[in-house]
């Protein structure tokens, strides 16, 4: 049986308060995603969509004590068993996150080009010139017109859509998975041979988004004890 790129098994996620009591946010989530798939996680506000997406990269543990049961298997490795300090080897290299508000995620006093170069060099040993060439290529691939002319501009000089494309470019070099705790970005990565994409959205899904999705995963607070129903919509 082929191994799934991401395999989530009986995942329960809880926030642990100062008094030691745990508040459960996700209960018994099961899903698996193969390379090349784009999956939407859909549900009403507060049902645990973003908590799940951020927990794949274990981003919440830096500010909040968390309790997990179950497994998050990425390429056969249980990420919950990996020491938190070693998650830096995965973040940005194997799995990337594209946040909802690119303006708050980008450094306003650092040029767009410098930020993409930083993303390229964070996990790869390349010269600054090689990183610059790759950064230019990434910006062109996500649809930034006149990328060379815009390379030394600042995030405040870009529109909201262009800033989100910059975030996609920063998430692209070498990663196998993209997580987006919001609706699908307007310009998604099209080449998904060895990747998967998870997008989280509210229960109302515009018809236009369905073209992004090969499967939908429904996560509802009213049905959180049950396994998710997959493939609500199948991509034609």
Image (tube, grey):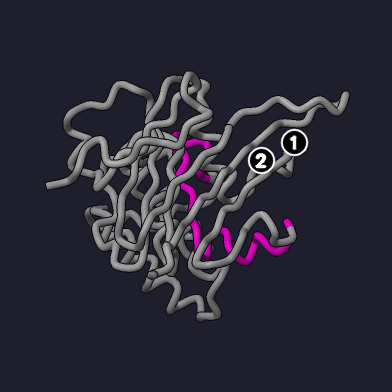
Spot occupied by residue 153 in the image (x, y as percentages of width and height): 40, 50
Q: State the residue at coordinates (47%, 53%).
A: 111
Residue drawn at x 73%, y 38% is: 66
Quarter of the image holding residue 3?
bottom left
Q: Position of residue 21 (x, y in %)?
A: 81, 25
Image height of 103 relative to 198, above or below: above
Question: In the picture shown, does residue 229 fall above or below 138?
Answer: above
x, y (%) of residue 206? 22, 26
Viewer-proximal residue among 125 and 29? 29
Would you say the residues marked 1 and 2 are in contact, meaning their CB atoms lie under 8 Å apart?
yes
In the displayed image of the protein, which residue is found farthest to the right?
19
Circle 2: element type: helix
Residue 48 inside the magenta-drawn segment = no
Q: Residue furthest left?
A: 236
- The stretch drawn in magenta includes residue 99: yes
Count of numbered circles on the image? 2
Q: Give the structural element (helix, strand or loop) at label 1.
A: loop
Give residue 192's position: percent from left, percent from top: 29, 62
Q: List the residue tagged with mark 1.
A: 64
Residue drawn at the location 42% of the way across and 71% of the way down: 132
Magenta segment, which residues? 84-106
Marks 1 and 2, Cα distance to the nearest angstrom?
A: 6 Å
Task: Tell me what residue is drawn at x 56 percent, y 42 percent.
Answer: 54
Q: Which residue is mark 2?
A: 60
Which quarter of the rendering shows the N terminus? bottom left
* Mark 1 residue crowding within 10 angstroms, few (<14) / some (14–19) / many (20+): few
Location of residue 162 with respect to 17 vertically, above or below: below
């Amino acid at each position: 049986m082929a191994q799934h790129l991401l395999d989530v098994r009986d995942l329960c996620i809880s926030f642990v308060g100062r008094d030691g009591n745990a508040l459960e946010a996700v209960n018994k989530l099961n899903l698996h995603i193969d390379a090349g798939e784009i999956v939407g996680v859909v549900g009403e506000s507060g049902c645990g969509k973003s908590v799940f997406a951020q927990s794949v990269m274990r981003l919440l543990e830096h500010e909040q004590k968390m309790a997990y049961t179950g497994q998050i298997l990425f390429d056969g490795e249980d990420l919950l068993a990996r020491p938190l300090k070693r998650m830096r080897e995965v973040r940005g290299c194997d799995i990337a996150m594209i946040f909802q508000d690119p303006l708050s995620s980008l450094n306003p006093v650092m040029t767009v080009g410098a930020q993409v170069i930083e993303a390229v060099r964070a996990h790869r040993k390349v010269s600054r010139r090689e990183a610059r060439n790759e950064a230019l290529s990434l910006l062109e691939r996500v649809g930034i017109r006149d990328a060379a002319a815009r390379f030394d501009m600042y995030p405040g000089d870009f529109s909201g859509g262009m800033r989100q494309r910059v975030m996609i470019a920063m998430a692209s070099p070498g990663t196998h998975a993209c997580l987006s705790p919001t609706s699908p970005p307007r310009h998604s990565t099209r080449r998904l041979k060895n990747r998967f994409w998870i997008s989280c959205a509210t229960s109302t899904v515009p018809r236009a988004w369905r073209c992004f999705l090969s499967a939908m995963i429904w996560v509802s607070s009213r049905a959180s004890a049950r396994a998710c129903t997959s493939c609500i919509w199948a991509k034609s």
